Amino acid sequence: MQNIHKTYVQELYDADGVLSDFSLTYPDRFNFGYDVVDRIADTDPNREAMIWINPEQEEHIFSFEDMKIWSNKTANFLESLGIGKGDAVMVIVRRHYQFWFIATALHKLGAVMIPATFMLKEHDLEYRVNASSTKAIICTSSGDIANTVDNVEQNCPSLEIKILLNGGGAGLVMDDQSHLSGPENICVLDAPEREGWIDFNKEVRSSSDIFNRVATSVHDPFLMYFSSGTTGNPKMVLHSGTYPLAHIVTAKHWHNVHSDEGAHFTIADTGWGKSVWGKLYGQWLMEASVFTYDFDRFNAADILSLLEKYGITSLCCPPTMYRLMAAAGIDNYDLSKLKYSTTAGEALNPDLFELWKEATGLEMFEGFGQTETTLSIFNPVNSKPRPGSMGKPSPALTVDLHSEDGRPCNRGQTGEIVIDVRAGKPEGIMTCYYREEERTEEAIRDGFYHTGDLAWVDEDGYYWYVGRNDDVIKSSGYRIGPFEVESVLMEHDAVRECAVTGVPDEIRGFAVKATVVLNEGFEPTEELTKELQTWVKKQTAPYKYPRIINFIDELPKTVNGKIRRSEIRKADEEAAAKIAEGLL
């Protein structure tokens, strides 16, 4: 290990070994592909970069030299198609190992990578391609996403190149593919023939593994994600080449990765920002190995068996996945190699914190950030997490809470989380919402980036999440954060999962509604509804109790397991409209 990351950071620690100050320095020419991936490959070629498997038992263990070779081959292939600096390339390849070749290659080329989920439908994809002027799409052959691309292509004038990638099993029912393991079988599967598409694996195999450095600037457009809100089209969040460096905090001081001590496993699809948080930038800057499981549907027993088999030492996933793993019977697996657990994506209920600690002996270290930022608030290595608290602001940022009138909040007062940008944007904060000046000015104004998330801070400086601005329920003059009601409900034996939202109410403005998934052995009854309502009244301020409880079999979630409250609200609005029209 060469401690490459120390080339770019200055760090200070307190008496307990907790990070207290963090800043970055870097040359204008810094490029993650050349200055991290290739540098490690040139000086420590056999260092493990990634362990990759799929449910069909195909396994590949990639060194940094492998990553340099295959990213060079990919860069030469893409360059031969006319893809270069500044070109927007949409990447929809699930968790296939080729994603890491593609990401590194696009960074070397100076192109702008736009990761996207394979779950997009025609309307979603058409908007994204046109809004970003996507020049090329690299797409998995698994599922229907290639059909979706073909169906919208005629409405997307910027789209010139379509590249099809056969990623192997991808968690689908197929013949045994374990014979595809090993270095000689990388990219051996040709894509199904499809008119107008170029075969990624075939062309990359035949490309040169020598690629000359392209001149790029660390301030060039680098990475773009589409981030959906409750209103309007998704926003295009643009980051510069400083973004990977900001994730040193993520990997070193939150995930607690170590270069020679096992692998880090973040459970996230490559179409979402959380993936590069935990599967790429910070981890490789720390010269550490990442673990990737190319599955189709989350199965807690499968994940537990992989943690045991591969001796995963550091794990990050949403609270829901931890809960499902706990329910699957942790005692049946040897997790003695697992040393660190982190979580993000949704608020952590204190009961889950204690449940996981009892089952594994490990505390969970919660963190908070957005697509627009890197890690902003977290419980750092060597700190003592408080169950249910996001932690404290990252030393890399100046974070505060502001009231609706823009004034700093007092301790205990709920306010919006803001990040100070008066002295310039810190590394990791978005460049802008691409091509949306008005939205950018709305988010970055008066010297602060406004997150739209609400929290309060206690006397010791720990932040406690309340909810999104658009999730907060205003009922009878009270502002009610959904998480505080959900936390109480989750402590009841009957409740497996829940989501709290507001529904229009003529008297109160909005009434609190809980959508609940029950544990086995419990049935939805009027008596249970009253019991849960009474439970909330006794555990927290009575005005917060859910006046409406709806029992369902499964909560709507993103591919990463994050609860989609907006979908619940939309269904309620549609039902209310039908009632008003006399249709229900």
Image (spheres, rainbow, N blue to C red):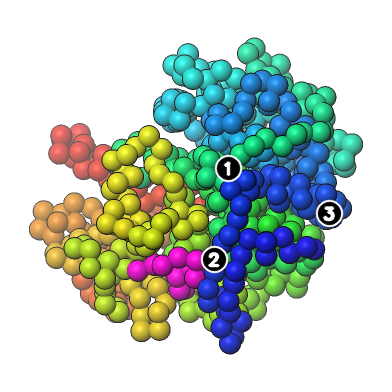
Numbered disc in front, either 3 or 1:
1
Relative height, residue 210 to residue 294 (above, below): above
Mark 1: give few (<14), some (14-19) or many (20+) Cα within 10 Å: some
Q: Amino acid at mark 1?
A: Ser
Tell me the residue that label 2 is attached to. 23
Say whether disc 1 or disc 2 marks the residue closer to the N-terminus.
2
The quarter of the displayed image where residue 501 is located: bottom left
Tell me the residue that label 1 is attached to. 217
Relative height, residue 297 to residue 405 (above, below): above
Q: Secondary structure at mark 2?
A: strand
Residue 192, magenta (yes or no): no
Dominant secondary structure, magenta: loop
Q: Secondary structure at mark 3?
A: helix
Residue 393, magenta (yes or no): yes
Say whether disc 3 or disc 2 marks the residue closer to the N-terminus.
2
Cα separation between marks 3 and 2: 26 Å
Mark 3: give few (<14), some (14-19) or many (20+) Cα within 10 Å: few
Residue 411 visible in the displayed image: yes
Q: Position of residue 181 (x, y in %)?
A: 85, 41
Cα separation between marks 1 and 2: 19 Å
Please give the name of the residue rendered at 23% of the width and 53% of the height, measured from the top-left corner.
Answer: 503
Image marks 3 and 1: residues in contact by CB distance under 8 Å: no
Q: Position of residue 545 (x, y in %)?
A: 26, 68
Cα separation between marks 3 and 1: 24 Å
Q: What residue range appears in magenta? A: 391-400
Q: Position of residue 583 (x, y in %)?
A: 20, 34
Q: Is residue 441 left or right of residue 5?
A: left
Task: Name the quarter where the C terminus is drawn.
Answer: top left
Please give the name of the residue rendered at 49% of the width and 20% of the height, measured from the top-left corner.
Answer: 158
Q: Amino acid at mark 2?
A: Ser
Tell me the residue that label 3 is attached to. 43
Q: Out of 145 and 488, give the one closest to the viewer.
A: 145
